[in-house]
Amino acid sequence: MGRDFHLSKAHVRTAATHPYLLCGWHTRSEIPLTSMPTSAVNGLSIDVLIRVAPGDSPIGKISARPVLEHSVECSRIRVDAVADFEVPGGQLITVWPAAGAAHKDIEIFLFGPVWATLCHQRGLLPLHASAILTDGRITAFAGRSGSVKSTTAALMHSLKHQLFADDILPIMFGENSEPGAWPYLRRLKLQDDSILQLALTAGEPVSEKLDKDKYFVHPKYAADDKWRRLDRMYLLEVDADNSQPSIDRLVGAEAVSALVEQTYHFDFIENSRRFNDHLAFCSKLSSKIAIYRLRRSHSLGDGKEFGSLIRAHLKTTT
């Protein structure tokens, strides 16, 4: 990744007044990020700019239907009744809100698939995972929607592990090809039952239309803005036939497949025809971290047994 992703001074002259540090990138946005603190941006050094554009988007001239157009250079995404998004060159996100669209609904897609697209363009692997810190290294919990990634991270947070990321964990290779990440969205989106079960305090609703049964939760223990090495990933799966949770190591092709399957917004890889590069990235990553399959029943019970299982495994496999 030898490209310079800093924006020019011309781009910086903008109405975007909300500064954040996301994935280690100085980000300035015209759209405020709910339940996230702002960050000081040093001078004109801005890595990512998020702006709202007036009028019709370029997608509007192409189609009135949902759109997913991806290339390494530029991506365009339309979410019906929410917004059109354009992401060129891993630096700029332009948003054309749909008439009457709620800010929080735009935010769900902006900092979900659209941000994942920007990560893809920059050569990162956005894992569909939540993450905590264990002894200064990242432990990720990946899985399909409904596999309680956020709840598992919240459970470990209740055991005083620092929250590192929720829902998306963008992975890169640092010095000496060590895999790791910067923190992203250190807030949790949880349903009422998980909040009550873990004795947490609910913040604002995530949305009134989308994810309307979830609330933001501010973590008591949050990781600082620092790159950390990725140590391991747990692939969360539900096994209805087994009441006892189990943890098994994945290796070889099975480990690589787990990383491919847990790639957030895989549409980018398919549409930009970068599968070979992506497979090489996942193969390299699987050789440098431990990957486990963690099976559990539908019910977490009070969560104590599940949390104790993970904590014991963390201690015995360091």
Image: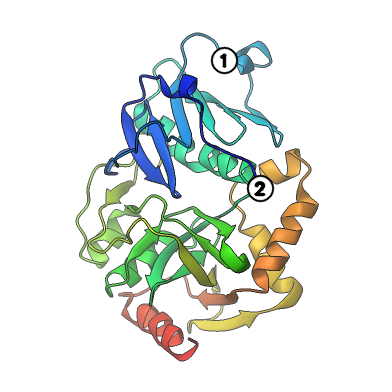
Instruction: Tell me the number on the disc at residue 57.
Output: 1
Classify residue 253 by image quadrant: bottom right
Let me know if residue 99 appears in the view.
yes
Query: For numbered disc 2, what is the local secondary structure?
Result: loop
What is the residue that sits farthest to the bottom in this orientation? 316
Q: Tell me residue 174's x, y (percent).
A: 56, 61
Instruction: Tell me the number on the disc at residue 280.
Output: none
Q: How many marks?
A: 2
Q: Residue 202, relative to residue 17: is it above or below?
A: below
Let me know if residue 81 appears in the view.
no
Viewed as shown, does residue 102 lie left or right of 260?
Answer: left
Of the image marks 2 and 1, the number of the one nearer the N terminus? 1
Amino acid of disc 1:
Ser
Q: Report the Cα–Cα distance between label 2 and label 1.
A: 24 Å
Choose between 260 and 189: the one closer to the eye. 260
Name the residue rendered at 47%, 16% in the picture.
53
Classify residue 19 by image quadrant: top left
Query: For numbered disc 1, what is the local secondary structure?
Result: loop
Q: Tell me residue 103's x, y (percent).
A: 36, 28
Q: Residue 216, relative to residue 221: is it above or below?
A: above
Q: Tell me residue 28's x, y (percent).
A: 39, 32
Viewed as shown, does residue 26 lie left or right of 267?
Answer: left
Per the image, the residue denoted by label 2 is 266
Q: Residue 275, relative to residue 229: is it above or below?
A: above
Classify residue 262 by image quadrant: bottom right
